[in-house]
Image: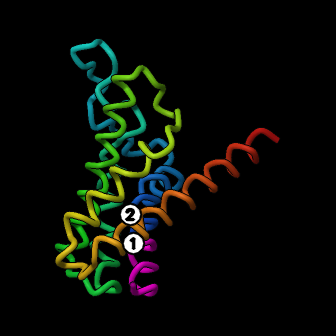
Amino acid sequence: MRAWLIYQLFLLLVITNAMPVIASLLAGRRWNWPLDGNRLFLDHKPLLGPSKTLRGVVAAVVVTALVAPLFDLTLTEGALFALLAMAGDLCSSFLKRRLGLASSRSVPLLDQLPETLLPLWGLQAALGTTISEILVAVALFVVVDLLLSRLLRTHNKH
């Protein structure tokens, strides 16, 4: 197993998945257009919720494409990586809305697995990874994300 490659995969996942949050912090309410247009699904619950915005997806795709060459990926592969990560994130949001959970509610594993497995599996050939390297990178991302989420929740209570 190649530790450096796993670290790179982890870093690429962090960059991609952090971009919607960073874009929100930088832009405030500007360009804050919900992807679902505030539409309801057949169950009369939000399709995705207000936190899934065009701004977030665009930020993730553009920035990931631009940093992709640092990870030996083309701009197109970087954009595809981000699109797959965002698709995974949207799938988890869709499922959470079906379960009646609020947009800000955290669900361990459901919040991390789709957005990490989809891009790593979908670009496995371009990334040159083994299944075990993908699983280790995903596990690392899940653990760090859960720890950071817990720290931020604890910090925000004080």
Say which residue label 2 marks: 16
Kindly identify the amino acid type of the residue bearing the numbered disc 1: Leu
Question: Can residue 3 be found in the magenta stretch?
Answer: yes
Which quadrant does the N terminus fall into?
bottom left
Is 137 left or right of 118, judged from the image as shown? right
Q: Is residue 25 found left or right of 33 in the rendered image?
A: right
| Quarter where residue 53 is shown | top left
Rendering coords of residue 158 (x, y %): 82, 41
Question: Label 2 sits on what residue type?
Answer: Thr
Q: Quadrant for residue 71, please give it.
A: bottom left
Taking the spot 28% from the left edge, 38% from the top edge, the residue there is: 35
Q: Is residue 100 above or below residue 6?
A: above
* Residue contact between numbered discs 1 and 2, judged by CB atoms under 8 Å: yes
Counting labels gives: 2
Classify mark 1: helix, strand or loop: helix
CA neighbours of label 1 inside 10 A, class few (<14), some (14 to 19), many (20+): many
Residue at horizontal 26 percent and vertical 57 percent from the top: 118
Residue 83: x and y in percent read: 24, 57
127 relative to 147 in the view: left or right: left
Tag on residue 12?
1
Q: Where is residue 132 in the image (x, y as percent from the top left)?
A: 34, 72
Magenta highlight range: 1-11
Expressed as whole percent of the image width and height from the top left, the position of residue 17 reads 42, 58
Instruction: Decide whether the magenta segment is chiefly helix, strand or loop.
Output: helix
